[in-house]
Image (cartoon, helix red, strand yellow):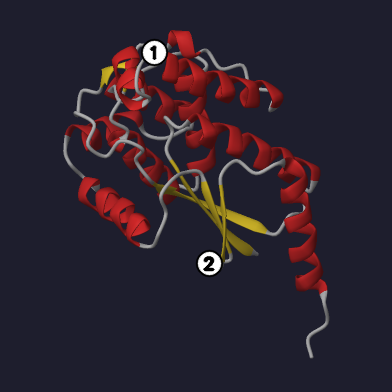
Amino acid sequence: MVKLDILSDPICPWCYIGKTLLFRALEQQPDHPFTIEWHPFQLNPDMPKEGMDRREYLELKFGGKEGAISVYSKIAEHAEAAGLNLDFGAIKRTPNSLDAHRLIHWAGLEGKQTPVVHKLFKAYFEEGKDIGDHDVLVQIAEQADMDGALIRRLLEGDADAEDIIARDRNARAKGVTGVPCFIVANQHALPGAQPVDLWLKVIDEIKAQLDAPSA
């Protein structure tokens, strides 16, 4: 197997698009060599713990209403092309995603990272849920057959928070400036939402290398 490390943030629309395209390729190549691990990267590491109003956030980030509309119209085009039905209008708050990253980390300990990541993306971008809210995170954990009561207790404390922050800072120190970022075999970085055809080519190349007779 070949390690595929994915740095992403569940409030990043490009990450949802990138995940969708990757997994479409994996569905076409069910004998792909990848073993996948998700890693934390916060788009807004300085976001207040309670999050902030979505419209205010977008206008501050993109220099006003027109800038936000311009950026998100492009995102909407790419999402539609990827077959995603994102409901940006339903999102009322931009959350601090630290607790969502903690949930992803705990899901990894149970081998349930990818299902939890998918449910976080879907909850935020398609259902307009606040994935900074502990009730929402517990619900997502339970949907992935995790122990909701345990997750709630962990969320109420600061378990693994410093570790998540340190991993985020380490990624930035190594040169990651945006997500999604896909790292293949701890050697090759593919930044951004890559098309299905590229992933199919990468998979074919890796399989050919793995199948090649050793010298």
The answer to which quarter of the image holds residue 78 is top right
Amino acid found under the numbered disc labelled 2:
Asn
- Residue 30: tell me if it is visible: no
Above or below, comparing residue 130 to residue 121 in the picture: above
Picture disc at residue 65? 1
Element marked by disc 2: loop
Where residue 87 appears, as percent x and y from the top left, is 52, 12
Amino acid found under the numbered disc labelled 1:
Lys
Above or below, comparing residue 202 to residue 57 in the picture: below
Position of 136 compared to 38: left or right?
left
The answer to which quarter of the image holds residue 23 is top right
Q: Which image quarter holds the C terminus? A: bottom right
Picture disc at residue 186? 2
> Which one is in front in this view, the residue at disc 2 or the one at disc 1?
1
Above or below, comparing residue 47 to residue 69 in the picture: below
Position of 19 compared to 109: left or right?
right
33 or 144, which lies in front? 33
Where residue 120 appears, as percent x and y from the top left, is 45, 28
- Residue 60: tell me if it is visible: yes
The answer to which quarter of the image holds residue 213 is bottom right
Query: What separation in Å lies between label 2 and label 1 (alpha carbons)?
Result: 40 Å
Q: Which image quarter holds the N terminus? A: bottom right
Position of 161 compared to 112: left or right?
left
Position of 175 compared to 188: left or right?
left
Q: Residue furthest left?
A: 157
Element marked by disc 1: helix
